């Protein structure tokens, strides 16, 4: 029954994606849903940005080992990112009428900076997408007994098909449906397990007091590490194509801004449910949460709950990961086709040809991520530093590019290159604080220095 339900759900997802594809008639429709999403679709799309394998597998696992202090990066940093993007970037970027985030760097600094920024944005999505596909493969393995690599391939085919056909429209509509399933599934599972464990009060009474510690020790190393954990997603995902494309798909700048706030609140609320569920599992089956706890939750649900609960849980779990995977495939494909490939093609492209190229890019990036997922199956290592790359190389140029008129092309390039170089250096030769801290400082210093010593002549503001 569970196997049949999973297959029906995948088929339904494909049908919804193909239905949404009827609204795709241009590259703008494909990449940004025609900039026409209402508040509810925009909010659900932004909510689904990161609600994937890290939130359900990774965060719950880390929470069992280290409490709230161990999950500052996600969900708290992820919610912070949406809040800051809405407050400081959504309206300004929306008013520029851009197709990709790479376009911002072209309009603001010229084509060389656009190319460099795009090259820095694209690679991190391979590992991130592969991590999501591995999670889907593991779910298929637990539920159906399929080898993990076969589950990866099947899941990749489903998500690639509806993304390549429907683009951002398909992602937005399926995100709405999947968000409903996520919320219903996790709420019902929380209630069922809480009752089985003797009630909310009893579960919380047995939790060690340190589990809910939220603030660091008051010494410089601990505080810097704490701030770095907030910054990985909180700042590092602001200059990312997936957040950009979801917000810019909104029907107006007002919707783009407010949907960020609503999504941040929804994300932080719903992301607490896997943490609570993990506490219930620990209370009910303490002997089975030792060692690698990433798959403890799905394994316990499969072994100790009734079929309706299993269907809801695995349906919501697959919904969460499919939502994240779809945008992590479209994002690099959009950057590659618009900001790397298109400028290299000397022959003028019609919008129809460009749309075809973008769809082909989706297939190529999905295929590469699928191969990577089949070769390397550690979710944590695959997802790893995807947001750190953009934090140390692109956050400062985006921030100053939006808010400092005298920020120059030389400053932007110096900031990108020096930030990545510093991060690599301090990663190989570790210091007492996370490598992203000195790298971010270097990126900011070189941005200001480069702009003061090498100011711009007037740069064309036309795309």
Image (tube, grey):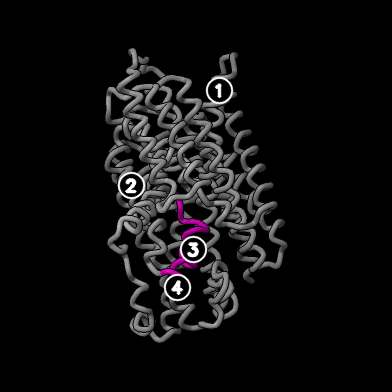
Label 1 SS: helix
The residue tagged 1 is 342
Residue located 42% across and 46% down the image: 436
Q: Label 4, on which residue?
A: 277
Q: CA distance from mark 2 to mark 4?
A: 26 Å
Give percent across and percent down for residue 417. Answer: 46, 31
Mark before the other along the chain sequence, 1 or 2: 2
Contact check, label 2 and label 4, Cβ < 8 Å: no
Q: Secondary structure at mark 2?
A: helix
Going 39% across and 22% down the picture, which residue do you hit? 410
Q: Which label's residue is closer to the chain start, 3 or 1?
A: 3
In the image, the segment drawn in magenta is 49-66
Pick the residue in front: 295 or 226: 226
> Which numbered tag is attached to residue 260?
2
Return the disc, 3 or 4, that comes first in the chain's sequence.
3
Q: Which residue is mark 3?
A: 56
Task: Mark yes or no: residue 318 visible.
Answer: yes
**Of pointers 2 and 3, the one earlier in the residue sequence:** 3
Image location (x, y in percent) of residue 295? 57, 68
Across and down, in percent, residue 230 comes to 36, 53
Q: Residue at x 59, y 39 (%)?
A: 164
Q: Quadrant of the N terminus?
A: bottom right
> Any magenta on residue 460?
no
Point out which mark residue 64 bears: none
């Amino acid at each position: 029954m569970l196997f049949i339900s999973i297959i029906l759900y995948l088929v339904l997802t494909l049908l919804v994606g193909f239905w949404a594809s009827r609204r795709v008639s241009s590259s703008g429709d494909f990449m940004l849903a025609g900039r026409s999403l209402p508040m509810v679709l925009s909010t659900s799309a932004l909510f689904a940005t990161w609600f994937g394998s890290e939130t359900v597998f990774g965060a719950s696992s880390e929470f069992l080992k280290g409490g709230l202090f161990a999950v500052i990066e996600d969900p708290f940093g992820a919610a912070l990112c949406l809040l800051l993007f809405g407050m400081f970037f959504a309206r300004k970027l929306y008013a520029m009428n851009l197709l990709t985030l790479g376009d911002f760097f072209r309009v603001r600094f010229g084509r060389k900076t656009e190319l460099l920024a795009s090259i820095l944005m694209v690679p991190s999505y391979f590992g991130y997408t592969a991590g999501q596909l591995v999670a889907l493969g593991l779910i298929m393995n637990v539920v159906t007994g399929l080898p993990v690599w076969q589950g990866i391939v099947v899941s990749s085919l489903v998500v690639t098909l509806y993304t390549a056909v429907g683009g951002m429209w398909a992602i937005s509509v399926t995100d709405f449906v999947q968000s409903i399933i996520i919320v219903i599934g996790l709420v019902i599972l929380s209630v069922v397990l809480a009752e089985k464990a003797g009630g909310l009060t009893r579960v919380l009474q047995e939790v060690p007091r340190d589990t809910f510690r939220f603030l660091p020790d008051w010494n410089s190393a601990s505080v810097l590490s704490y701030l770095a954990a907030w910054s990985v997603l909180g700042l590092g995902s602001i200059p990312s194509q997936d957040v950009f494309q979801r917000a810019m798909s909104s029907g107006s700048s007002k919707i783009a801004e407010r949907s960020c706030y609503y999504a941040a609140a929804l994300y932080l609320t719903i992301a607490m449910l896997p943490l609570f569920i993990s506490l219930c599992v620990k209370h009910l089956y303490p002997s089975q949460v030792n060692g690698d706890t990433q798959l403890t939750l799905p394994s316990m649900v499969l072994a100790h709950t009734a079929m309706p609960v299993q269907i809801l849980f695995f349906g919501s779990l697959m919904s969460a990961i499919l939502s994240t995977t779809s945008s992590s495939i479209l994002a690099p494909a959009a950057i590659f086709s618009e900001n790397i490939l298109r400028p290299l093609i000397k022959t003028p492209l019609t919008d129809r040809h460009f749309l075809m190229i973008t769809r082909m890019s989706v297939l190529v990036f999905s295929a590469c991520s699928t191969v990577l997922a089949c070769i390397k199956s550690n979710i944590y290592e695959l997802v790893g530093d995807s947001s750190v790359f953009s934090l140390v190389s692109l956050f400062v140029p985006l921030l100053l590019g939006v808010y400092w008129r005298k920020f120059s092309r030389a400053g932007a390039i110096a900031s990108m290159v020096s930030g990545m170089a510093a991060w690599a250096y301090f990663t190989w030769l570790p210091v007492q604080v996370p490598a992203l801290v000195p790298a971010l400082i270097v990126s900011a210093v070189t941005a200001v220095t480069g702009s003061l010593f090498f100011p711009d002549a007037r740069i064309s503001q036309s795309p």
